[in-house]
Amino acid sequence: MKKVGMTLLSACCVAMLLSCGGGGSEGDPNLTGKPFGRRATGQPTFTGSTVTGLIGIVVDSSTGTPIANVAVAAAGLNTVTDANGNFAMPTIPNGASVVSFNIASHAPQSRTVVITSGIETSVIMLMTPNAATTPSTFDPAAGAIIVSGTAQLNAAAGALRLSDGSLPAAGNATVILTPLSPALDAYLEPGEYVAGGSTPFETFGGLDIRITDFAGGAVTNVTGSVTIDIPVSTRAAVPPANVTLFRFDPISGGYVADGTATLVGSVYRGTITSIGPWVAGQTYSPSTINVCVENQDGVRISGARVQSDGINYSGGGAAVTDATGVAQVPMKLGAQAVMTATSPRSSNSATISAANSASDFVLTPCLVMPTSGLTIRLTWGSSPSDLDSHLVGPNSTHVFFASRGSLSAQPFAALDIDDVTSFGPEVITVARLPVGTSEYFVHNFSNTFAPGITASPARVEMRFGSQIRIFAPTAGEAANRYWRVFQFSVAADCSVTFTPLLQWSSTEPANPAGTSTGAYCG
């Protein structure tokens, strides 16, 4: 079992919505001036003006690269992301709004936000790039079998229609099938995991389908036989033999139960009634988790979005903290989930175990949302079973499973979750940044390579204020057990620079700060 031999190892040896204010250029490694909000003396020297309404950034889910020219729409308002992936809707009305994100190169996305007076709301949206589709064009009048990996669309001759019910224009239509991977990140599927307005469900895989006829019209309706294969993607140990098909409703931001699908090998196969995003899933009885959120001084925070993310199931729910700083967050009854708060910044994370997931459970202690700092989230596939997060830096800091750290005392960084049974997440939260150089790396504790870290696949997501960086392994893993992901350097004035490493090592990386000591910002 892991943790045996801990002393020997120690000796040899980071949905989602953010609330924040201000703005700045994105996409470069030096993040000085990027995260929003005022800072006191001794805290990171970030600048920015307070804003109202909704702001955000849209990034590629595979690379973390900001995406320009994404069409963003909400509450009758429209805008596009700039060259650095940023957007702003300062006049969006208070209350709940469904925000949609569309660009030809990626599967569409959607999220529901709650806008509150006096609270600056921001979205960090991940969009999945289009998958390769064969054939990429076909004649709707003749029908075709379309393939993308193990995903498939089988459209009978003449089965497709435009939104007004008319036939597609004569000639070849363009088709894109993009599988969505909730096992990697449940929030890569659009919208909220709610069917019929209030019934929560978990997902076992999703598929986005887009068809454009020869004249450029959107093919959305189905009048004949159209079946799909959705690749299985779930954190659940055993996918069920039969599930419900849910179609995404872009108006409500939720889903509508519409058919069934059967497990056939590694896919769910079923018949669909429209063209668009579809999810294979099943409803569940929810547990309500009462989660309080506070800052590092113990002051409760209202207007924070608290989100559950399943550990042994794929799915989640969200709620916003009230005036007392408490949110009632749904999760699957009897399952395990991670709770995280965002707005104005990311909090630490806490695990709700099956033993504690009663229908009305109070999470203690409160989630802590530090004034400054960052979160690092590691996720991966079913194998290797155990990948470990490590953070090393000034003041002889080494945060990992054998030395979990603390948010309230030195090193002001902590491993919130240590996952030893596949998928993750493992989350390291840094509450106060140390002056000097720190490094984050991943250790393949399982020491298995079929697949290894690269083919698992593993992904590291770093969030720092309004910034997001996503790191994927590069070539060269071989039998190397350590993946050096990135370093960050904090100057004496508390400005911060991030440096991607993306290197492999057969031995544990040395602490880049050596034995040096440094003050803490924040």
Image (cartoon, grey):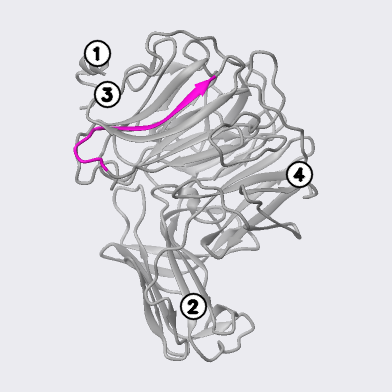
Query: Residue 321, percent across and down?
Result: 65, 34
Q: Is residue 489 magenta?
A: yes
91 horizontally vs 510: left or right: right
Q: Which residues are magenta?
A: 476-490
Asked if residue 14 can be seen in this view, the reply is no
What residue appears at the point 77 percent right and 50 percent down from the top-left corner? 92
Taking the image as drawn, is residue 392 in sight? yes
Tell me which amino acid carries mark 2.
Thr
The answer for how far apart the CA atoms under marks 2 and 4 are is 37 Å
Comparing labels 3 and 1, the label whose residue is closer to the camera: 3
Instruction: Give the number of the disc on residue 53.
Output: 4
What amino acid is labelled 4 in the image? Answer: Gly
Residue at 41% across, 54% down: 181
Quarter of the image for residue 471 reads top left
Task: Please name whichever residue, 46 or 236, is drawn nearer the observer in this view of the structure.
Answer: 46
**In the image, is residue 127 above or below residue 230?**
above
Mark 2 and mark 4 residues within 8 Å of each other at the beta carbon: no
Indicate the position of residue 206 as horizontal and vertical percent values. Answer: 43, 60
Q: Nearer the viewer, mark 1 or mark 4?
A: 1
Q: Quadrant of residue 7?
A: top left
Q: CA distance from mark 3 to mark 1?
A: 11 Å
Position of 441 relative to 266 (above/below): above
- Give the secondary structure at mark 1: helix
Residue 11, labelled with which disc?
Answer: 1
Q: Is residue 138 above or below residue 479?
A: below
Q: Is residue 142 left or right of residue 237?
A: right
Disc 2 marks which residue? 174
Q: Position of residue 369 (x, y in %)?
A: 59, 25
At x 51%, y 47%, the residue is: 65
